[in-house]
Image (cartoon, rainbow, N blue to C red):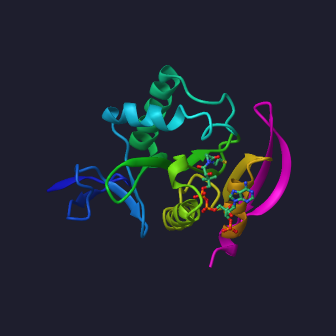
């Protein structure tokens, strides 16, 4: 069966496609990154409504309305440009996080983002996910954007900052972003591999 792939190309669906037939963006040993669907709103909301997960996010936990809005953004971004902050599932097909890319405020770079449900923390999963996303970024450059990758995290988000550091991101400074102090970092294309 042919369907439209995440880069807009026709792709053959194989046994590698997730069980419910959604396109797979990438797989790591323990996680699979897939497209979102409208029907994911419940899972999407649960993931983003947890105060612990959302404690370093501007605006804090999502309301159901905010979740609906953001899921709509992600679906539109996927349809329009072929990349977004995708759905992350575990071996059993459960939605356990999101990971992928936004656009920096300047509109010049992809920005790496990841979020996992608390039951997944502390096992190296974010590092595994972020590493695979960085590989995806360099393998699928957007011709309109810088090849370098940007990331930023609340200054107190030690776990996230450590993930970035382990991947080789270099800190470029600290400044307020939407009212909260954030540490910005960059991974230059020429530094990867
Ligand atoms: C940030 C997050 C993705 C990390 O996930 P994770 O799977 O636990 O991360 P990993 O296990 O891959 O690695 C985390 C690293 O930070 C370290 N770390 C974790 N918590 C820490 C803390 N409170 N203080 C210091 N280091 C910490 C870990 O020891 C590990 O480093 P190490 O390999 O050198 O030991 C996860 O906590 C999360 O989803 N948080 C909520 C969403 C979020 O904040 N996303 C990032 C937005 S910028």
Q: Is residue 73 above or below residue 167?
A: above
What residue span does the magenta drawing correspond to? 169-193
User: What count of labels does the image hold?
Assistant: 0
Which is more toward the observer, 76 or 145? 76
Q: Residue furthest bottom?
A: 193
Quarter of image, res 176: top right
Q: Is residue 165 above or below residue 109?
A: below
Dominant secondary structure (helix, strand or loop) of the stretch shown in magenta: strand
**Quadrant holding the C terminus:** bottom right
The residue depicted at 55 percent of the width and 64 percent of the height is 123
Which is more toward the observer, 128 or 49? 49
Going by the image, does 81 lie left or right of 138? left
The residue depicted at 85 percent of the width and 43 percent of the height is 175
Going by the image, does 92 lie left or right of 181? left
User: Which quarter of the rendered image does ligand 1 occupy?
Assistant: bottom right
Q: Residue furthest front?
A: 119
The residue depicted at 65 percent of the width and 43 percent of the height is 107
Going by the image, does 191 lie left or right of 26? right
Which is more toward the observer, 121 or 155? 121
**Quadrant holding the N terminus:** bottom left
Is 141 a magenta residue?
A: no
**What is the x, y in percent for residue 79?**
39, 41
Quarter of image, res 72: top left
The residue depicted at 34 percent of the width and 51 percent of the height is 8
Which is more toward the observer, 122 or 150? 122
**What is the x, y in percent for residue 174?**
85, 48
Q: Residue furthest top?
A: 65
Is 178 a magenta residue?
A: yes
**What is the x, y in percent for residue 157?**
73, 49
């Amino acid at each position: 069966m042919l369907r439209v792939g995440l880069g807009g190309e026709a792709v053959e669906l194989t046994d590698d496609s997730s069980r419910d037939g959604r396109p797979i963006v990438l797989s790591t040993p323990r996680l699979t990154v897939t497209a979102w669907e409208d029907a994911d709103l419940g899972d999407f909301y649960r993931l983003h409504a947890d105060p612990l997960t959302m404690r370093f996010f501007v605006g804090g936990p999502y309301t159901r309305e905010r979740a609906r809005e953001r899921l709509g953004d992600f679906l539109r971004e996927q349809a329009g440009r072929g990349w977004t902050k995708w759905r992350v599932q575990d071996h059993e097909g459960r939605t356990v996080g999101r990971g992928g890319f936004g656009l920096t405020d300047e509109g010049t770079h992809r920005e790496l983002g990841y979020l996992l449900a608390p039951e997944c923390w502390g096992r190296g999963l974010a590092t595994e996910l972020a590493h695979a996303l960085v590989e995806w970024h360099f393998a699928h450059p957007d011709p309109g954007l810088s090849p370098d990758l940007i990331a930023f995290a609340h200054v107190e988000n030690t776990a996230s900052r450590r993930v970035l550091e382990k991947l080789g991101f270099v800190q470029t400074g600290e400044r307020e972003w939407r009212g909260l102090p954030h540490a910005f970092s960059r991974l230059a294309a020429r530094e990867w591999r």
